[in-house]
Amino acid sequence: MATRVIAKLVDEFGEDNLDRIEAELTKVLKMGIEDWFAKEFFEFHTTLYRLRPVIWQISSERFRQGRGRMKPAFSCFCYWHKLDEDTMPKVRQLYLKPVFEASRMEVENIKTKLSKVDGKDKREVEIELESALTKYEELKAIDEAFEKLLKPQHEITVTSKSGWVKEKVKEITENGYKPERDYGVRVNIEPLKHAGVTAKTADRVKE
């Protein structure tokens, strides 16, 4: 999304002015455009749409270990009005899997590198490996969460006073996640929250 915004800025203001415009936006946002979309956009959008967002952030944020406000290892956006039963499998296979595999290869490459160094260089590579492993474990966790989401589920604890919401959440998950847009954002986002594949801001979407 940040790439699209930057492309739009180029269309509007020209390539020569891009650095200046980006600098001004960074000053206003207090971070770069890419970081803002990864960390802040979904919360802004959720508030703007009165807790019924039409753009959902799929994110490994819930599985981070000691990373503070750093970007999640995986993050993408889904458009509510295009949501169907193929959306989440596609997110997993087309977007998450390549990142996950790249992370696995990075870990293997660093391990090979570690076996060839010693002394001060070895400690630096050990730190590099620790960081790569943390990222890999985060990606592994969200991949496992997707696997659970896409399997039939019979017991999801829904925090809602509405019996209708609970009934419809059960309906769209009992044969694997099968969203039904006619049931609205509240029902359809609940299984994603429960699985842990959304950014934490999604927890605000409730009665």
Image: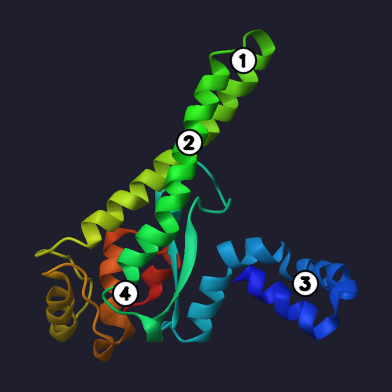
| Of residues 108 and 198, the one drawn nearer to the viewer in this rendering | 108
| Rendered residue at 65%/74% (across/down) | 4
Q: Amino acid at mark 4?
A: Ile
Q: In the drawing, what numbered circle is on residue 122? A: 1
The reply to whether callout 2 and callout 4 are in contact (CB within 8 Å) is: no
Query: Residue 134 vs residue 120: left or right?
Result: left
Identity, as a three-letter code, of the amino acid under mark 2:
Met
Q: Quadrant of residue 145?
A: bottom left
> Nearer the viewer's eye, disc 1 or disc 2?
2
Q: In the figure, is residue 188 to the left or right of 28?
A: left
Q: Which residue is mark 3?
A: 25
Earlier in the chain: of badge 1 and badge 4, it is: 1
At a point 37% along the width and 69% down the height, the residue shown is: 203
For marks 3 and 4, give the CA distance. 31 Å
SS assignment at label 3: helix
* Residue under label 4: 189
